[in-house]
Amino acid sequence: MDIVLEQTFENLSDFTKAEYENCTFKACDFLQADFSLAKLINCTFIACDLSLVQMQNCMIQDTAFIDCKMLGIQFNECHPFNLSFSFENCNLQHAIFNELTIKKTYFDHCQLKEVDFSHAQLSGSRFLNCDLAKAVFVQTHLEKVSFKDSYHLVLNPNQNHLKKTVFSQEQLAGLLKQHDILIVQ
């Protein structure tokens, strides 16, 4: 597999499998591309469409996604070794992160509707101003996770591992929803 170092790619529509290190991808249309077995190390994707990208054994380390459309990506198929990434202003609807160890992952202003975080290890992660409508948290490790300023969060504290997890007062209803009680102000 070729090694590509410190290059910038703009407006691509075809993805070539390689090991990319310190590369930047801008405004690329990789809809349904095959990233299987590729390596993305310290890369940045800006304003790219990565929806439905195939990720079987794709290695992703210290990679940032900014202003990207990433619908339905099965991140759980990525190679788990040192898997690390961050997301800023991305649409990740229907993405799957279940059973992944992705501690200290940063989600900033992201659409996380119907995302599956079940059985994931998210300790130390931050969800800043994210839409978590119908996101799935079951047996998820959420120690020291901050959900501050995020909205539409519904999770059952009895089905998740919480310790020093940060919630806003507005999120209390989502934590108590399974008890079918009403909270009034």
Image (tube, rainbow, N blue to C red):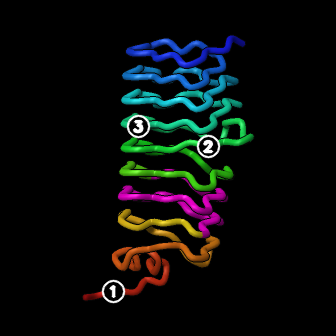
Relative horizontal placement of residue 31, taking residue 121 as reference (left or right): left
- Which label number is shown at residue 84? 2
Kind of residue sitting beneath label 2: Ser
- Give the magenta part as a residue range: 114-143
Name the one closer to the observer, 108 or 117: 108
Query: Contact, CB < 8 Å: mark 1 with mark 2?
Result: no
Of the two numbered discs 1 and 2 on the same chain, state the one appearing first in sequence. Answer: 2
User: Of tags 3 and 1, which is closer to the observer?
Assistant: 3
- Which label number is shown at residue 66? 3
Kind of residue sitting beneath label 1: Ile
Query: Contact, CB < 8 Å: mark 3 with mark 1?
Result: no
115 vs 138: above or below? above
The quadrant of the rendering that contains the N terminus is top right
x then y, percent, for residue 91: 39, 42
x then y, percent, for residue 75: 60, 40
37 vs 125: above or below? above
Give the residue pinned by disc 1. Answer: 183
